[in-house]
Image (cartoon, rainbow, N blue to C red):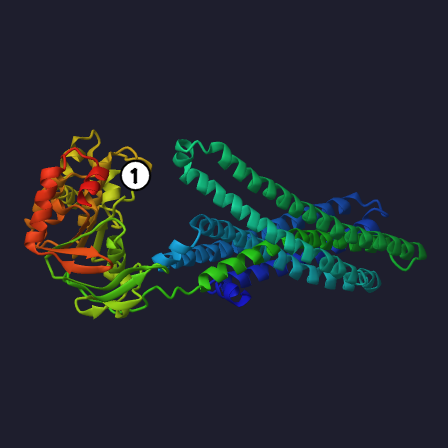
Amino acid sequence: MWLQYFQRYRGQYRWLVFSFFLSVLQSLLVLPAAWAVATVFDRAIPASDFQQLLAISAALLVLSATSSALALINRYVTLRSTKIVTRGLREDLFRKLYSFSRNFYDKGDRNRLHSVIVQDSERVDFMSNALVSQMLPSMFTAVLIGLVLLYLNSTLAIVLIALLPLVVLTNRWFQPALKSSVDRFRKSFDTFSSGVLFVVDTIDLARVQSAEQSELARQDKALEDLRIKSGRVAWLQTAYSLAQNSVSIVGSVAILAGGGYAVANGTMTLGELMSFYVVVGLLRSRATTIAAAVPLVVLGVQALKSLNLLLDQEDPHDYRGRGRISPTGAFELRNVCFDYEREPVLTDASLLLLPGQHVAIVGPNGSGKSTIIHLLCGFYRPRKGSLFADKMSYDDLDIVELRRSLAVVQQEPTFFSGSILENVAYGANAPDIDRAREACRVATAQDFVESLTDGYQTQIGDKGVRLSGGQRQRLAIARALYRTPMLLILDEPTNHLDVDSISRFLENLKQQDTGPTTLIVSHDYRVVAQADQVYGLEAGQLSELRAEELAHWVKLLGDRVDPEASPEQEMGHER
């Protein structure tokens, strides 16, 4: 884990070496400071040489200012490196999220995943700052200061060294308890963070179900647990700091007593004692910095372990091919079997889509229509059988590149807070207004967009809340067309659009010179009847419907279904 962590500092080594150099300079300033203090007490004060006293005081101020300047520069250098490392870690986490298959997200807790990535990456950032900017420089400086103390007075320095076992024992006693407490706090905080996301995402559900009080009660348990765990960590951190401070005080008292005895015996001057005491104070400040960094490092280590487990996690359901093609719109499912770890959804299903062809799949809800879409997009791998794009197996293809030639209009399309243009051109580096207009025209969205006061710059609100269902569906189709896909998939397009609107869109699509291959997935026979070829999906198998069968169902629906009927009524008639 540590090897992987420090490998992230590649490219930052010269900055870290520079930081090391600055730490050396800052430590060397202790020598002239110690000499200056000794001179003040041994010469200037006894001789009442106020001119020398003022000169040495000014020199001490210059040394202090120089030390502060070096510390500030050093802090900037280390922060620059640690922040770049944290950014790289977060970038890897984002890439990892996009590498997981749909199966990974189906099984996992997305709120907890969000919490782990956000909170643990922040904890690693805190750890990096504490480790690289504070702990390591302070440890190195403490060693140099220790050498200075040995040079000033070896006897008193040995007294300090004798206290090291006490420091080690204090660490060994506190760190296991601190580590365990920090781990419990981290888990409790992740639960709290997940709870906040859950409340925000399900606020409407809680209101319509009148579940506010029960949800508050559930979250109160998490809040109480967090209160206890965070309080325990804070108490242990304080106890650890006080224990370290007590050791430092013992050392200071021992130096004062031993040095005072040496001064009284004439084996040490008062100036030598005071200079030694000043240097000990600097050593004590470094020890305090190290002690303050320990809890952050402990917390960061647990977070780093968690993130490394996520980064090292393999997803066997993901495609790993690297081949690239320029798809023509030919796709195929060949003898595909698939299940969601329960009863089979698809059994020996085969489907052929030819370039420019309009194909439809009809079947009742739950029959596996959406599963076929997910398979074509490479979200899942079939348990048996294969998928092909232009006769090349999905196993050999770079699935990310292949998806660039696909576009899917989902049953419930996803939108984000922003303008219509930003949502339609999502994924493009620079939105093209002319391209967006053409896509909206084909998708029958142009009229309503241009009727808005701000047109394509209209803000649609979070998740497109300021638009109607039909408007969102039209924009979703326009977004799919903006990419000029080779395969366009429409998943239940009549969820928010009537049959006439879909018919106008399909007619616009057919009038294009180089239109995409289109796959319509629906339970509405009147929509799929407009396709060149129609498949029925039942009992996990696909079978082509004969023209007379399709005509029978279309006529039956036309005779029996009220144009204003609800989707539930239409589905009842269909069954």
The residue drawn where x is 51% and y is 60% is 15
* Residue type highlighted by circle 1: Gly
Which of the image's four quarters has the C terminus?
top left
Residue farthest to the right?
265
Residue 509 appearing in the image:
no
Q: Where is residue 153 in the image (x, y as percent from the top left)?
A: 81, 62
Q: Where is residue 166 in the image (x, y as percent from the top left)?
A: 78, 59
Q: Position of residue 59 (x, y in %)?
A: 69, 49
Q: Could you say which is closer to the camera, residue 177 or residue 34?
A: 177
89 sits left or right of 513 in the view = right
The residue drawn where x is 24% and y is 55% is 373
Q: Could you say which is closer to the camera, residue 5 or residue 575?
A: 575
Residue 197 appearing in the image:
yes
Q: Position of residue 235 (x, y in %)?
A: 69, 45
The residue that mark 1 highlights is 418
Residue farthest to the top?
453
Q: Could you say which is closer to the camera, residue 241 or residue 99?
A: 99
For label 1, count other residues whose C-alpha is less than 10 Å away and answer few (under 14), some (14-19) or many (20+). some
Dividing the picture into quadrants, the one containing residue 572 is: top left
> Disc 1 on helix, strand or loop?
loop
Q: In this view, does 151 lie above or below 490?
A: below
The residue drawn where x is 71% and y is 49% is 241
